[in-house]
Image: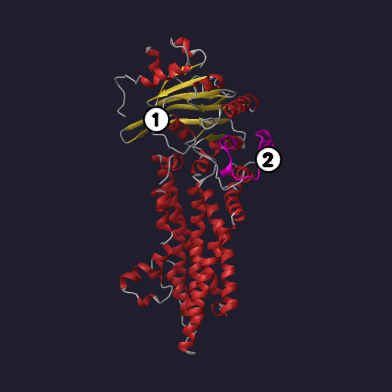
Amino acid sequence: MRLRPIAGIVLRQLYLFRSSPVRLFPTFAWVAIDIVIWGFLSRYLNDIAGNHLNFVPNLLGVVLFWDFFTRIMQGVTTSFFEDVWSRNFLNLFASPLSISEYVTGLVLTSVLTSLIGLVAMLLLATLVFGLSFVSMGLMLIPFVLVLFLFGIALGITASAMVLRLGPASEWLVWPMPALISPFVGVYYPISTLPAWMRAIGHLFPPSYVFEGMRALLNGEAFSAITLLSGTALALVQLVLAGYLFARVFRYTVRTGLLARYSAESVG
Amino acid sequence: MPAALHRPPEPATDPAQPDTVLSVTDLCKSYAHVCAVEQVSFNVRRNEIVGLLGPNGAGKTTTINMILGVLAPTRGTIVIGGVDVAKRRSQALSRTNFAAVYATLPGNLTVEQNLRFFGLVYGITNLASRIEALIGQFDLLHLRHTRCGVLSSGEQTRVALAKALLNRPQLLLLDEPTASLDPAAAQTVRKQIRELARQEGCGILWTSHNMYEVEEVCDRVLFVSHGRILLEGDPRALPAAHGVLSLEELFIRLAREPLHHTDEKPR
């Protein structure tokens, strides 16, 4: 893998952010809105519940983590969509750029944008609502890592889907995090769910993160093996996502879909 | 129609010869029951401009897409600068570049940003000086900070040509490069491309529907119809050799008379 082509993919996105700051809007605006809504809701619930339970980390904290995961996934897909929207596939894939270089470029772009978003989220949530993750300590690192890995895997999978099904399938990508959220226990323990939903939830690594976070915040025991299982699952899914993208790419080259993506009107 | 017109020509030169920049051998592309390209073989040599002519749907763009690696052949080999595209894709594609009217550069990047982006994608060293040279060569100095989306057709063609020369390609593919240009702009572009072939020493494969342009620019032409090469030769000598007054008349005659091979594949 060569560094220059990867740098090219990242640089392109930075150019777009610089020339059109409105592209940064989703990175901060939706996050800020979420934090304000859930922050005030957490305060209200704290007032009702008295001192029994602190809702700020239990509710606002998990919302912040879920937003981080969503930004990671959308960081990959948005960068990919730039090539869909500008009909750039022919220019890109008729070049020496390899699929692994292209996907790595998308991932690095996502890392940069989502880290900026994460810092902004943490600052806002800490300064305005007093959110603190001190009780989680070093466990914060694997939690973020699992969400990061799964976000990347889902972003690559969604990009492969759009490459295979065509630009119109972009509309299936945006609601993906919302479709997953009921199963992974973002807002409630997954023990609340019926058995079939729990079974689905265990296929998604974030369910292990949110269960772990909730246990730590409430001073309960949490098995490291469970978190390791979530990490391993996320890694396997990341590898599978990369394999899927490469397979779909080869399919589009074999069938002519890739050439038509640019050469003809897309719809 | 002379029988010689219906004989697919053999490659004119030995692929092993050092001045061969493109060697296409027995190239076929089939989709289900449709044969888009069938047993196409030809070479392009250094300093040579070869015209790929034929009616709409003849298989010109399919052939170009296969050479560019965005469409996999059903059968046959493509060797660019001695490297097989199917075996060492990145290495082969680093030796070529292209400009096509249907593959515009991202309109939301400026001229300079596009050149930098694609320069990195092609892994160019000393990119800054290469960009400066191309900006000067194609008179783009006053447009360097202008977004490509707002440029005129002629300006976009110049930027596309500058991008196509970033990596000093051994083989340059130009798919109707003057299609959207006014006669004066088209003449300028033709002059620039002729100079390129002479000065840079690259081979050029050029498609066009403008037969006057082809006579002016191309050293050799290949007539393609129904996915096969029907005729090959000097565009200035072919009309007289086939009893017509002009290349355009020959083109129309070939385009209107379908193949009558007994072994013709269904389309």
Query: Earlier along the polypeptide chain: callout 1 or callout 2?
Result: 1
**Which residue does the numbered mark 1 point to in the structure image?**
B57
Toward which corner of the image does residue B132 lie, by quadrant? Answer: top right
Under circle 2, the secondary element is: helix
- Residue at the spot x=47%, y=13% of the render? B239
Q: Nearer the viewer, mark 1 or mark 2?
A: 2
Q: Relative to the observer, which residue lies in front, A165 or A157? A: A165
Q: Which residues are magenta?
A: B132-156
Q: Is residue A6 visible?
A: yes
Disc 2: CA contacts within 10 A as few (<14), some (14-19) or many (>=20): few
Q: Is A6 situated above or below A69? A: above
Determine the CA span between mark 1 and mark 2.
39 Å
Between residues A123 and A107, which one lies in front from this camera angle?
A123
Are the numbered discs 1 and 2 placed on the same chain, yes or no? yes
Residue B95, image x, y percentages: 57, 34
Q: Amino acid at mark 1?
A: Gly
Disc 1 residue crowd, few under 14, some 14–19, many 20+, Cα 10 Å? few
Measured as percent of width and height from the top left, residue A10 is found at 58, 52
> Dot 2 corresponds to which residue?
B142
The chain that hosts pointer 2 is B
